Image (cartoon, rainbow, N blue to C red):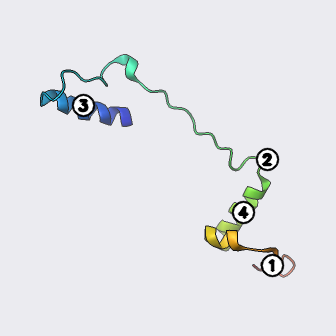
Amino acid sequence: MTVILLGAILEGAVERELIAHNPARGKGKRVRERAPRRTYLDRRHIERKAMMATLVFAGLRIGELCALRWRDVDLEAGWL
């Protein structure tokens, strides 16, 4: 998408005679897109899953989650 937008901008510069040719034009100028790597919630990051669940289900902000201490958690009573 970015390359298409850049090509359109450069095409306008060619029409206004600001540049001689559009360097973004041509078949070899395409950029391959890669699938995003999602490593932040895989099996190796159990503590991250717990943090995400706490953020979502308790409605905490990130600063509040980072400030939590074990004395603030009572698993038996079910409160933070």
Label 4 to label 3: alpha-carbon separation: 46 Å
Decide which of tag 2 and tag 3 comes sooner along the chain: 3
Disc 3 element: helix
Amino acid on which the number 3 mark rests in the picture: Leu
Residue at numbered disc 4: 51
Circle 2 residues within 10 Å: few <14, some 14–19, many ≥20? few
Q: Which comes before the other along the chain, label 2 or label 1?
A: 2
Q: Which residue type does callout 2 highlight?
A: Arg
Q: Quadrant of residue 35?
A: top right
Of the residues tagged 1 and 4, which is closer to the observer?
A: 4
Tell me how far mark 2 sits from mark 3, CA to CA.
Answer: 45 Å
Q: What residue appears at the point 64 percent right and 43 percent down from the top-left corner?
A: 38
Of discs 2 and 1, which sits in the foreground?
2
Q: Which of the two discs, 1 and 3, sits closer to the camera? A: 3
Asked whether the residues under the numbered discs 2 and 1 touch, taking CB atoms below 8 Å apart as contact, a structural biologist would say no
* Relative horizontal placement of residue 77, taking residue 25 as reference (left or right): right
How many dots with numbers? 4
Look at the image and tell me whether residue 12 can be seen.
yes
Amino acid type at circle 4 is: Met
Which residue is drawn at the image coordinates 79% and 47% (left, top)? 44
Q: Which residue has dot 1 on it?
A: 78
Residue 55 image position (x, y, % from top left): 66, 67
Q: Nearer the viewer, residue 66 or 78?
A: 66
Q: Earlier in the sequence, mark 1 or mark 3?
A: 3
Circle 3 sits on which residue? 10
Q: Residues within 10 Å of mark 4 (few under 14, many from 20)?
A: few
Instruction: Please identify the quadrant where the C terminus is shown.
Output: bottom right
In the rendered image of this protein, does residue 39 appear above or below residue 68? above
Residue drawn 38% across the image and 22% down it: 29
Q: Are marks 1 and 4 in contact (CB under 8 Å)?
A: no
Residue picked out by circle 2: 44
